[in-house]
Image (cartoon, rainbow, N blue to C red):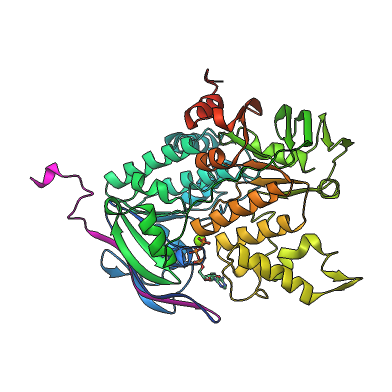
Amino acid sequence: MEGCRSSTEYNRALLLEAKRIEKSYGGVRALRQVSFALEAGEVHALVGENGAGKSTLIRILTGAVEPDGGAVLLDGQPIRDNSPHRSRELGIAPIYQQPAIFPDLTVAENIALANETGGLFRRVRWGDRVKRAAELLESIGAEIDPRRLAGSLSMPEQQLVEIAKALGGKVRVLILDEPTASLTERETGRLFEVVRRLRDNGSGVIYISHRLEELPRIADRITVLRDGETIATVSAADTDSRELIRLMAGRDLSAVFPKREVPIGEPVLRVRGLTSEAVGIRDITFEVRAGEILGFAGLVGAGRTQVAEAVFGLAKIDAGKIRLNESRVSIKSPGDAIEAGIAYVPEDRRRHGVAAELPIRANMTLSILDRVSNGPMLDEDGERIVAESWAQDLRVKAAGLDAPAGSLSGGNQQKVAIARALATGPKVLIVDEPTQGIDVGAKAECHRILCDMAARGVAILMISSEMAEILGMSDRIAVMRGGTIAGIVNRADATAESLLAMALGGSAQ
Ligand SMILES: Nc1ncnc2c1ncn2[C@@H]1O[C@H](COP(=O)(O)OP(=O)(O)OP(=O)(O)O)[C@@H](O)[C@H]1O
Ligand SMILES: [Mg+2]
């Protein structure tokens, strides 16, 4: 009889277990008495607000961080001398929130380095390495040439390489810390197929995500962390987003902020025929009006981030014109863009986002130093007041605003980067995946802030891989395909299907 039931229903063996884990950083108790059990053949989701302790728990499971107390067990046996190397040997394959690739090596070399023993420079057959990398990438549906330099990949492409890396070796436990944060529907679907395949073959998968609506598609059980404590473990089939949010936040909370319709004014940013060979975009033409949110949709690699980079002076422009209000502007550097009133929140907020060693408050006000300074002197009180108000609005969870930004959880670092761009009071705001990695409460808050800015006449260009965000927040939507704009549609005329068809090159226009 039992053979008739799917392996995900019951009778699963305990695979990896965390028992009564304790971890403090200075005065911050990141985890208190946290227990977590992963069974073979299940996808176990781990959810919680930004700073709840998810990534810390993962780092302890993989031996990257040592707990102050408690134990990690594999097959019922404590893992002795746990370390990233040791746990990888045991078949625990983590994919961290921030890709950890070597930018100066090729994709194939990065994948090989993670999986070959004997070092990168032992005698190898390069052709075999490239072939193996190509197979792994293809198995997850990633269209990436293994010979490319890893540093040239976009953030989501790097994420896909991370996944290929993890799948290259023995995988008993796959750990995904927000893998879909910057992936579009299509890549997410492919990733889920890989995850299901592993599960059906008896591996266990730990899955961290802030996209609660995707959990029913992928998770068997869900464990909720709040303020470093385990709150509940529930069956995914018996719960819904609302209940999860209540468990995560400890109270009822709205997950969505409805878009506010505001009067749309004159065009503020006009881009004509923008072409940049360096980043592979051509003939980009669009305008964004005061009060308008122009969404940018498209598949990973379609060139959305590159348009933002070109407009912000981060990519060399070969042809095309940019006008702000009525005047033509020449943007050759981010300095020129800021001068012209453009602010940019990049997607890869680790590389361009926060200065890890500077205090949180300094990070938030870096872009408005002139306003929090008194002549050459920094007005610390002024800085603190500005930073505190942003920290409150975006619900930044921190030990204090003097703490270094690097000590914040992933999602809280994102909030700091957002605050910094918003603080400049720009005419044009470019946001790339504004709510990626941010918990549901802060996401609604972030949407509210974008609407407030639109209401004040800011022209907003919003790149997002999340269809609900694109359809919910945009006034018009530009769909990119292969480095150019395939079409621009009004929100009223757009559906998820029609946008995807345009992104793929289908007929729906
Ligand atoms: N290296 C560190 N130094 C100081 N504090 C830290 C460090 N790493 C984590 N913390 C603190 O531990 C707590 C838990 O952080 P963690 O990164 O585990 O959160 P998370 O649940 O992964 O959040 P997110 O959803 O934002 O990624 C936070 O308060 C964070 O500031
Ligand atoms: Mg995290």
Q: Nearer the viewer, residue 89 or 320?
A: 320
Residue 330 shows up from this direction:
yes
Left or right of 440, for residue 309: right
Q: Is residue 73 magenta?
A: no
Magenta stretch bounds: 1-26
Left or right of 9, for residue 122: right
Question: What residue appears at the point 61 percent right and 58 percent down from the top-left corner?
Answer: 414
In the rendered image, residue 207, in percent from the top left (x then y), is placed at 40, 54
In the rendered image, residue 457, in percent from the top left (x then y), is placed at 74, 46
In the rendered image, residue 404, in percent from the top left (x then y), is placed at 66, 71
Left or right of 314, for residue 298: left
Q: Nearer the viewer, residue 454 or 116?
A: 454
Question: What residue appears at the point 60 percent right and 70 percent down from the top-left corner?
Answer: 407
Question: What residue appears at the point 77 percent right and 77 percent down from the top-left corner?
Answer: 381
Q: Farthest left residue?
A: 1
| Res. 3 image quadrant | top left
Compared with 387, 133 (above or below) is: above
| Res. 389 image quadrant | bottom right
Q: Point out the image quarter for the N terminus.
A: top left
In the rendered image, residue 486, in percent from the top left (x then y), is placed at 62, 24
Q: Farthest right residue?
A: 375
Q: Point out the image quarter for the C terminus.
A: top right
Q: Is residue 2 magenta?
A: yes
Left or right of 421, for residue 74: left
Q: Farthest top residue?
A: 507
Q: Nearer the viewer, residue 45 or 96?
A: 45
Q: How many marks?
A: 0
Compared with 17, 460 (above or below) is: above
Question: What residue appears at the point 80 percent right and 37 percent down from the top-left corner?
Answer: 316
